[in-house]
Amino acid sequence: MSLARVVVIGSSNTDMVVKCASIPKPGETTLGGEFAMFPGGKGANQAVCASRLGAEVVFVARVGNDVFGERAIAGFEEAGVDTSFVVKDPVHPSGVALIVVDEHGENAIVVAPGANGALMPDDVDRASEAIANADVVVTQLEIPVETVAHAVKLARQFGTKVVLNPAPIRPLTRELLADVSVLVPNQHEAAGLLGKTEFEKMDPSEAASELLALGVDGLVMTLGSRGAIVADANSIKEVPALKVDVVDTTAAGDAFTAALSCGLAEGKTLVEAAQFASRVAAISVTRLGAQPSMPRLDEVESFFFGN
């Protein structure tokens, strides 16, 4: 059986993480605890996770020509990710993310994009052969929307499935969404796409129907501890979350998106892929950090079925 082929087009950051009792309010200074630096960025997290889950992964990205960029590329290569299309930007520094994690594992994140903001359609075009040969292309919104739109359209021209994780939330055209095979928002991103301010006041199934009406083929809407809603033109189903001891939710959504994409690349149905993704995300929240939390396929199998 051939490996699932996944192309990830997206961001690479260095995550600077501080643990504290509670996330500071505006104007508040809080004394924190442990500090750590981890490789991160939504695109990079998804690429590393997909590779650890056994996929053949090509990553399209830009990093700075600096120590953070060097470390990032070394980490991708160690994880088995093809870095042929990771460019060292001669002008912009590597992206960084400042992350606060509270005692419940919830987080607040601010990202300085750096070289991620310079990832252009030309960078995508250089990887066109890999995109044409892929089973799934995955992208997110920590890179310019024009680049995302170009990547989505190019992938669909080649007949390659497109998974879009619309994070952080930004305005998207119906034209772009019409080329998306599977949209993977969390509840806050879903609210933003629908022009709502509070998701809590929305019925998840109704929200799923409204999001499908934007033109995407399929939808997997993650709801944190409540699980996920899986929807397409034929049905709307719930996939429950698994109960684990939460340490850090950073990159749980990336683990979910990567695992979902791997499942689809392997021929799983949308529901089957979402169930697999739920298991992978559950493991990721039991560990601190973004890429360090991403499990290998054997860990996923042993974590739930080996004991």
Image (cartoon, grey):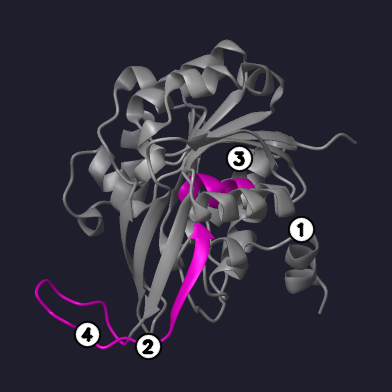
Q: Residue at x 37, y 46 (%)?
A: 205
Q: Is residue 200 left or right of residue 62?
A: left
Q: Amino acid at mark 1?
A: Leu
Count residues near mark 1 (Cα–Cα under 10 Å), then give few for <14, some for 14-19, many for 20+: some
Looking at the rendering, in which quadrant would you find the C terminus? Answer: bottom right
Structural distance between the alpha carbons of marks 4 and 1:
38 Å
Nearest to the eye among marks 4 and 3: give it: 4
Q: Amino acid at mark 3?
A: Leu
Could you tell me if the residues under marks 4 and 1 are in contact, i.e. CB atoms within 8 Å? no
Closer to the camera, 270 or 303? 303
Structural distance between the alpha carbons of marks 1 and 3:
19 Å
Magenta-colored span: 21-47
Q: Which mark is residue 33?
A: 2
The residue to which callout 1 is attached is 297
Count residues near mark 3 (Cα–Cα under 10 Å), then give few for <14, some for 14-19, many for 20+: many
Closer to the camera, 242 or 236? 242
Structural distance between the alpha carbons of marks 2 and 4:
10 Å
Closer to the camera, 9 or 162? 9
Q: Residue at x 32, y 45 (%)?
A: 190
| Residue 23 counted in the magenta span | yes
The residue to which callout 3 is attached is 270
Nearest to the eye among marks 3 and 2: give it: 2
| Residue 79 counted in the magenta span | no
Element type where label 2 sits in the image: loop
The residue to which callout 4 is attached is 30
Structural distance between the alpha carbons of marks 4 and 3:
43 Å
Q: Amino acid at mark 2?
A: Gly
